[in-house]
Image (cartoon, helix red, strand yellow):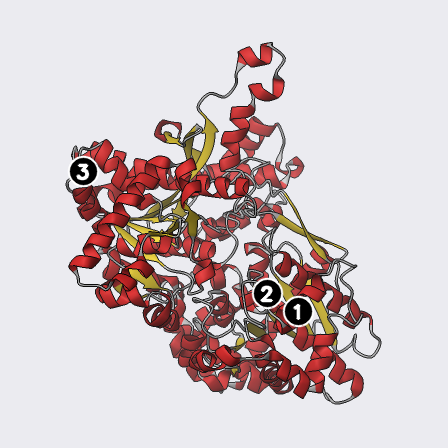
């Protein structure tokens, strides 16, 4: 498309809305006027797309997180107007690059939320009728900053300058009822623009507002706080993503959030369908709902409740329809991460839902007896047991399909995590390996590499057909092409180093190896093992046992949940190691460590393009998929990792010889862990002992908090909820260091190393979210392309 009369409208609207000319306007004002022009020009296509989605069978994606990131660049790219806007703004001395100051919409914490955003992008591009539902958090996750090496959080007020891409739809507001309050769910709609198509999907995010905003009588009695109490209580529900829930009050708020957007979304879908067809009898023919993890599973009993109380269906009829409508994506195999709720708490907050879950549990028990399942097996699978509601069990029992998100992950679900369910409902289980959108994660974030790819292919078909990269394998031994590739990699590393210096005040050696681990901070992702390996190498360089080490910048990025004490301890440890090695005269020219602050989508766009080595080192069998590994791979980076999650498939595509794989495999750990004693490793290996003792011998300081001592004992003695070294950090440490040193040595032959990187990029086609969404559409949702 082309923006109509953009220059004239741009100048006129800046004058009309802000009384400024382009040279006087702030970045936020320019962004607001630019986005308003785009929103105006796409409005007709968006409305046609809405009607088209509602007229045929469609899918709705319910997710607690949508980590969409900054919208402006992606929207211009998908509309094909980046060059027009850049050129016409340039005539007024304005650069699109200035939009770097615009806030990310940080409405997610990691892969789960970014996956949801990629899926909507792919569906829009593939002309598939998929729309998203979530929460419009006022403050998103949080902004992270470091003080004395510790993580601190502050509110991320991403809408403080307005919400340029969101459209408030007051007429579609619905009420959500709790035992102690009723709130209004007001939707804000965001366009999801398909690349090179007229199809525009919709991300509908709900904001919680009070039914009665202000009690004037209380205010008049000078009870000022009480007069606005209901407004504050309602706003709390959509205020922050993942409120700290280590207290009962936090758990109640989290449960209210999950019910809030699930209830509002179900009400919205039912209202739209009833308006069009006048009956709910054919709801399952026109609607399919994908539950992204367990957070929205509460939508199942809510749907059944509304079908019974508002539409007059029997429980059995409503359940039968629900099974046809709902599908569940599982994102974890760890029992402690499978969501569950205290029965009394649920009954206290949403008693109307707990009643339906009790009925579901009773029906489940009856179904199992009719199938001849033994009582002890039934007891293990109940939806409610030991005064606890198991949300994953509700999801599996009440869905048509349950999918894992990587081949290994799905097999583990079948064999262990959900094996009892798989034995009863094998036809429900399916694998769909996750993917990423190449529009944002290559075309947008790495324009230099994108240009080379397009030049070699003689067209840009890869932007919608990523498998076409496979044909570039023939250039792996073309010295001229690989040299161009190295030049691009060095340019992206230089850009990343400049960005880190600007944002975090740390000057990196741009000629060093950039070895990067960025993802959620969690013990199973083993940032701790990475930190310990750096100490291992540091000590080795100091004592002369490690020689000829290629200068390396070890770059971390991650946010810890505010209440996750041990994860915060690992962040402090990494920052203390950075202080140690970066200032040591013997090592500062060989090792640099930096923990970038406030890791987010816009930071990730620079990190994945500037990496030489991608760290994907989770304990085998713990990572469901990992999509960060795909982003690095697509930008021509080798993987240093375990055979876990999607790493297994990445290696299968690009070749183990082009990556650095180490560590115990899933089947090996099944035999190792029951008898595993990490103390034996520490006692037998002097170098590992020195690294572990560094946590308590004063080598690094936790400022008297006891955090490092706790990390030490979690490794050697375990905790109340897991065994010693639960994630096999010490068991994998030595082979990990060996793999690290091998990659480090290989880097000295830039041409050979770049060839490995190139072949990773060429074989990234499978990991497009376009492929993932096509599989969902065909195998689970049964939806077809639409014509706008």
In the image, 552 versus 198, the foreground residue is 552
Q: Residue 769 lies in what quarter of the image? A: bottom left
Q: Is residue 10 above or below residue 72?
A: above
Q: Is residue 255 left or right of residue 53?
A: right
Give the x, y percent position of residue 194: 37, 52
Badge 3 density bin: few <14, some 14–19, many ≥20, Cα 10 Å: some
Badge 1 density bin: few <14, some 14–19, many ≥20, Cα 10 Å: some
**Residue 342 visible here:** yes
Q: Which residue is mark 3?
A: 280
- Pointer 2 and pointer 1: residues touching (CB < 8 Å)? yes
- Pointer 1 and pointer 3: residues touching (CB < 8 Å)? no
Badge 2 density bin: few <14, some 14–19, many ≥20, Cα 10 Å: some
SS at badge 3? loop
SS at badge 1? helix
Distance between mark 1 and mark 3 Cα atoms: 57 Å
Distance between mark 2 and mark 1 Cα atoms: 8 Å
Q: Is residue 406 above or below residue 657?
A: above
């Amino acid at each position: 498309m082309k923006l109509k009369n953009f220059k004239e409208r741009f100048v006129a609207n800046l004058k009309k809305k802000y009384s400024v000319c382009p040279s006087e306007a702030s970045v936020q004002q320019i962004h607001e006027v630019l986005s308003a022009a785009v929103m105006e020009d796409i409005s007709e296509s968006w409305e046609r797309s809405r009607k088209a989605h509602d007229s045929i069978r469609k899918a709705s994606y319910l997710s607690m997180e949508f980590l969409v990131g900054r919208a402006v660049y992606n929207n211009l790219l998908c509309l094909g107007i980046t060059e027009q806007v850049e050129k016409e703004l340039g005539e007024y001395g304005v650069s699109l690059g200035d939009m770097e100051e615009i806030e990310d919409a940080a409405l997610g914490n990691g892969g789960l939320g970014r996956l949801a955003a990629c899926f909507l992008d792919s569906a829009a591009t593939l002309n598939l009728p998929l729309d998203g539902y979530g929460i419009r958090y006022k403050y998103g996750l949080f902004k992270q900053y470091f003080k004395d090496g510790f993580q601190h959080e502050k509110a991320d007020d991403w809408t403080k300058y307005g919400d340029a891409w969101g459209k408030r739809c007051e007429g579609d507001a619905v009420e959500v009822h709790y035992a102690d309050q009723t709130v209004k769910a007001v939707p804000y709609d965001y366009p999801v623009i398909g690349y090179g198509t007229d199809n525009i999907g919709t991300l509908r995010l709900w904001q919680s507002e009070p039914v009665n905003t202000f009690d004037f009588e209380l205010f008049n009695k000078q009870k000022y706080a009480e007069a606005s109490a209901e407004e504050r209580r309602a706003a709390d529900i959509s205020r922050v993503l993942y409120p700290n829930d280590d207290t009962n009050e936090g758990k109640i708020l989290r449960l209210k959030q999950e019910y809030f957007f699930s209830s509002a979304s179900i009400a919205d879908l039912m209202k739209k369908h009833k308006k069009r067809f006048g009956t709910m009898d054919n709801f399952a023919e026109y609607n399919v709902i994908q539950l992204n993890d367990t957070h929205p599973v509460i939508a199942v009993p809510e749907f059944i409740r509304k079908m019974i109380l508002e539409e007059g269906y029997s429980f059995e009829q409503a359940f039968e329809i629900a099974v046809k409508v709902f599908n569940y994506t599982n994102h974890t195999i760890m029992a402690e991460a499978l969501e569950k709720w205290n029965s009394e708490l649920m009954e206290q907050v949403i008693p109307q839902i707990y009643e339906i879950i009790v009925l579901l549990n009773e029906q489940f028990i009856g179904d199992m007896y009719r199938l001849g399942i033994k009582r002890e097996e039934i007891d293990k699978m109940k939806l409610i047991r030991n005064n606890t509601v198991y949300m994953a069990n509700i999801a599996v029992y009440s869905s048509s399909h349950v999918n894992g998100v990587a081949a290994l992950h799905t097999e583990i679900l079948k064999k262990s995590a959900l094996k009892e369910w798989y034995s009863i409902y094998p036809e429900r289980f399916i694998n769909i390996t996750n993917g990423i959108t190449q529009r944002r994660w290559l075309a947008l974030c790495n324009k230099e590499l994108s240009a080379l790819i397009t030049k070699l292919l003689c067209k840009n078909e890869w932007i919608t057909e990523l498998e076409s990269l496979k044909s570039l394998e023939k250039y792996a031994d073309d010295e001229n092409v690989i040299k161009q590739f190295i030049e691009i990699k060095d340019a992206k590393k230089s850009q990343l180093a400049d960005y880190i210096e600007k944002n975090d005040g740390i000057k990196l050696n741009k000629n060093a190896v950039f070895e990067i681990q960025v993802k959620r901070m969690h013990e199973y992702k083993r940032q701790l093992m990475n930190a310990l390996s750096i100490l291992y190498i540091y000590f080795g360089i100091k004592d002369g046992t490690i020689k000829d080490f290629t200068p390396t910048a070890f770059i971390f990025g991650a946010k810890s949940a505010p209440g996750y004490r041990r994860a915060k301890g690992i962040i402090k440890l990494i920052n203390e190691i950075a202080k140690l090695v970066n200032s040591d005269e013997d090592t500062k020219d060989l090792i640099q460590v930096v923990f970038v602050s406030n890791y987010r989508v816009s930071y990730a766009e620079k990190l994945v393009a500037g990496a030489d080595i991608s760290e994907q080192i989770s304990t085998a069998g713990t990572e469901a998929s990992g999509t960060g590994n795909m982003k690095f791979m697509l930008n021509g980076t080798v993987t240093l990792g375990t055979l876990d999650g999607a790493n297994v498939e990445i290696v299968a595509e690009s070749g183990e010889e082009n990556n650095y794989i180490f560590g115990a495999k899933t089947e090996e750990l099944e035999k190792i862990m029951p008898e595993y004693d990490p103390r034996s490793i520490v006692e037998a290996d002097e170098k590992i002992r020195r690294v572990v003792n560094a946590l308590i011998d004063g080598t690094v300081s936790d400022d008297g908090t006891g955090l490092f001592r706790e990390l030490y004992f979690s490794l050697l003695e375990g905790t109340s909820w897991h065994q010693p070294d639960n994630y096999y950090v010490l068991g994998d440490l030595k082979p990990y260091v060996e793999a690290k040193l091998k990659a480090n040595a290989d880097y000295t032959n830039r041409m050979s190393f770049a060839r490995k990187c190139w072949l990773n990029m060429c074989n990234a086609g499978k990991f497009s979210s376009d492929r993932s969404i096509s599989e969902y559409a065909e195998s689970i949702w049964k939806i077809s392309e639409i014509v706008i």
